[in-house]
Amino acid sequence: MKRNLLKTGIILLAVTFVTLQSCEKKEFIETENKTENNEILNINENIEVAETFVYYIDDIQANKEEFDEYTNKYEDPFIIYTGKEDEETEEIINVVYAYTTEAGYIKYGEKNNLKLKELLDFETHMREYAEKSGAIAEFEKTGKVPESYKKYEEAYYNKVSKGGNKALLVEFSKEHWRRGSHVYMGHMYAVMPFGWDRKVSSLQYIGAAGNASLYKKRFYGRRIGYFPKVGSTVINLYGHADNATRSAIKHW
């Protein structure tokens, strides 16, 4: 009898120990998963900060009204959007340079080591090729870009860019501060993916730094602006640039 009671006691202790171990293990796993999820959320979180804008037209400081008048006047404007964070206030200072001539735009690029002339050449070449090859006509008819055009465009891009852009990808978002839906561009979009035509409100470079140019027409027509920025900085689009993108290039 005593032996049976001792045996029963040992079994109960063993069951209790296993149960406690199981509970501890479950609690640890849940806590661990919660921590991992929080880290992921923190990585994707973008804190809204104040933004101000400073405008220049042909290197002369202008106000917002003058800049808006400029964007309405010029169908294919020459605009560079730059920015930096104020170290004291953490406010984002957006400095926008607009030029009334191609020469002024190219000169800015030369002064700041941005290959804007090469970008203009790429835009022109690909627009002409899209027209002559029938890619535009086929897209307008079928809603699809011909594979032959895609292959040529990729080969030509690789030829002229020589891997110069440090950004691995360009992330487009449907809302400011990188919120809402996202889509990722490798080199260029002659037309935006399904559901993204005129839907971009912010962008961010995935990588050390990046340069991208956005357009109001498919196949790189009607420039919105050129956006050279450091990676991890969210670029919000406002005014004529918001919800306007129909094609884009990750520039080198």
Image (cartoon, rainbow, N blue to C red):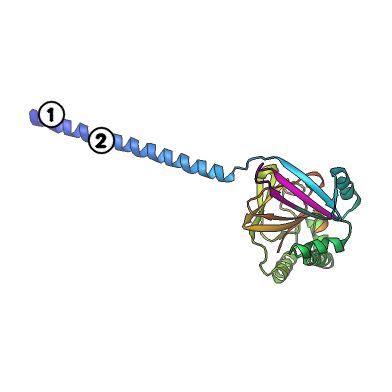
Residue type at mark 1 is Leu
Question: In the rendered view, does 233 fall on the left or right side of 116?
Answer: left
Q: Nearer the viewer, mark 2 or mark 1?
A: 2
In front: 113, or 69? 113
Q: Give the quadrant of residue 167.
A: bottom right
- Labels in figure, total: 2
**Magenta-colored stretch includes residue 90:** yes
Look at 88% across and 46% down and name the residue there: 66
Question: Could you tell me if residue 94 is visible in this image?
Answer: yes
Look at 38% across and 39% down and name the residue there: 28
Residue occupied by mark 1 = 5
- Rate crowding at label 1 as few (under 14), some (14 to 19) or many (20 or more) other CA atoms within 10 Å: few
Please say if the residues under marks 2 and 1 sit with CB atoms less than 8 Å apart. Answer: no
Q: Which structural element holds mark 1?
A: helix
Q: Which residues are magenta?
A: 82-98
Residue type at mark 2 is Phe
Question: Could you tell me if residue 200 is visible in this image?
Answer: no
For the N terminus, the image quarter is top left
> Vertical placement of 175 versus 227: above or below?
above
In front: 209, or 204? 209
Q: Residue furthest bottom?
A: 159
For the C terminus, the image quarter is bottom right
Q: Which mark is residue 17?
A: 2
Q: Give the quadrant of residue 191.
A: bottom right
Look at 72% across and 67% down and name the residue there: 157
Query: Residue 189 placed where, x, y %?
Result: 73, 58
Look at 22% across and 36% down and name the residue there: 14
Lower position in the chain sequence, tag 2 or tag 1: 1
In front: 98, or 125? 98
Q: Which structural element holds mark 2?
A: helix
